[in-house]
């Protein structure tokens, strides 16, 4: 990945910060974003039962919910070439981890992470769909 491509991908992520952090009520979190040129470690749930699933982790999020801190990391090579819609879905998915991460503490096994991933994916899809539906409705109203 060239420096120019890296800067382009970073700018796409920064636009998503502006678009999503405040509407999801996360502006009161200290959010750090790391832009990585090396592959990210897969989540623990990806390496269970003596097999490793074959996908590349595009992003991950670590949360210290009691202090309202979160850190997101993006594998810039893995997201390079993704569509704006794909990147937005990924970004919102990672933000949703911030919203629900503290629930994982009540599970001592991998099931907690798997449930979190499922909840986060459902919320991310609902948020993107809701924003798109509201945007489309707003465009219709302006045309009247």
Image (cartoon, rainbow, N blue to C red):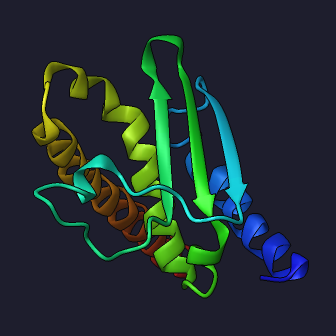
The percent position of residue 46, horizontal first and vertical second, equals: 26, 59
In this picture, residue 81 sits left or right of residue 54? right
Q: Nearer the viewer, residue 110 or 92?
A: 110
Which residue is at the far right? 4
Which residue is at the far top? 66
Q: Residue at x 69, y 49 (%)?
A: 34
Query: Residue 54, can we see it?
Result: yes
In this rendering, the answer to whether 89 lies above or below 124 is below
Q: Residue at x 64, y 34 (%)?
A: 31
Q: Nearer the viewer, residue 22 or 17?
A: 17
Image quadrant assignment for residue 136: bottom left
In this picture, residue 42 sits left or right of residue 12? left
Which residue is at the far front? 50
**How many numbered discs?**
0
In this rendering, the answer to whether 46 lies above or below 67 is below
Image quadrant assignment for residue 129: bottom left
The percent position of residue 8, horizontal first and vertical second, equals: 80, 76
Q: Nearer the viewer, residue 136 or 141?
A: 136
Image quadrant assignment for residue 74: bottom right
Q: Residue at x 39, y 63 (%)?
A: 128
The percent position of residue 78, horizontal first and vertical second, equals: 56, 75
Q: Residue at x 15, y 20 (%)?
A: 106
In this rendering, the answer to whether 99 lies above or below 96 is above
- Tell me the quadrant of the picture where the N terminus can be found: bottom right
In this picture, residue 116 sits left or right of residue 73? left
């Amino acid at each position: 990945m060239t420096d120019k491509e890296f800067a382009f991908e970073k700018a796409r992520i920064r636009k998503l910060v502006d678009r999503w952090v405040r509407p999801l009520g996360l502006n009161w979190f200290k959010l750090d974003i790391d832009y990585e040129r090396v592959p990210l470690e897969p989540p623990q749930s990806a390496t269970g039962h003596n097999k490793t699933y074959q996908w590349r982790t595009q992003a991950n999020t670590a949360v210290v919910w009691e202090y309202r801190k979160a850190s997101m990391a993006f594998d810039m090579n893995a997201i390079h070439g993704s569509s704006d819609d794909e990147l937005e879905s990924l970004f919102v998915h990672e933000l949703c981890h911030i919203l629900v991460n503290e629930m994982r503490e009540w599970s001592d096994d991998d099931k907690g992470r798997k449930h979190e991933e499922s909840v986060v994916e459902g919320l991310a899809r609902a948020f993107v769909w809701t924003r798109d539906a509201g945007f489309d409705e707003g465009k219709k109203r302006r045309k009247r």
